[in-house]
Amino acid sequence: MKQFVHFVAAGGIAALVNFLSRIALSLVMPYPSAIALAYALGMVTAFTLNRRFVFPAGNEHPGKQALWFSAINLIALVQTLAVSLVLARSLLPALGIEIWREEIAHAIGIVVPMFSSYVGHRRLSFRVR
């Protein structure tokens, strides 16, 4: 349980990097592109924090850890992008929500893959052999 709490904390920091950078990037690029680039910035932050503080016992080569981490996060990116776009472009407008629409959609999109990512990183990215 302690490890999951650390994972959530590291993820929270990475999500904040993701979220705030997406807002800044949206000033200079389209929303889907800003989501993808912001996700990459958050992913680098998450890898660094997870390797150092959440899964320090992982003894795979860092390159192999990064490969698994990237693969798991690519799946999570698809989830994040799909949820964010469906919410921002369809569901929230249908509910009459226009103010902060993209921010609400993106925040929910970031949270969706949290549990599957934890399991994937624990079992694959930072496993102990």
Image (cartoon, rainbow, N blue to C red):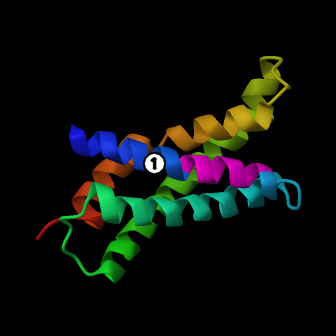
Q: Which image quarter holds the N terminus?
A: top left
Instruction: Classify residue 109 by image quadrant.
Output: top right
Q: What element carries label 1?
A: helix
Q: Is residue 21 magenta?
A: yes
Question: Which residue sits at x=32%, y=64%?
Answer: 52
* Amino acid type of the residue tagged 1 in the rendering: Gly
Q: Which image quarter holds the C terminus?
A: bottom left
- Apparent side of residue 25 relative to residue 69 in the rendered image (left or right): right
Which sits in the foreground, 12 or 125?
12
Q: Identify whether 31 is placed above or below 45.
A: above
Q: Position of residue 10 (x, y in %)?
A: 42, 50
Instruction: Classify residue 127 by image quadrant.
Output: bottom left
Question: Which residue sits at x=14%, y=66%?
Answer: 128
Q: Identify whether 49 is placed above or below 108.
A: below
* Tag count: 1
Q: Is residue 125 magenta?
A: no
- Apparent side of residue 98 relative to residue 126 in the rendered image (left or right): right
Q: Position of residue 118 (x, y in %)?
A: 33, 49
Question: Which residue sits at x=83%, y=54%?
Answer: 26
Q: Where is residue 114 in the image (x, y as percent from the top left)?
A: 43, 43
> Which residue is tagged 1?
11
The boundaries of the magenta stretch are 15-23
Identify the main secondary structure in magenta: helix
Q: Identify whether 87 is placed above or below 76.
A: above
Q: Where is residue 100 in the image (x, y as percent from the top left)?
A: 80, 30
- Apparent side of residue 42 relative to residue 120 in the rendered image (left or right): right
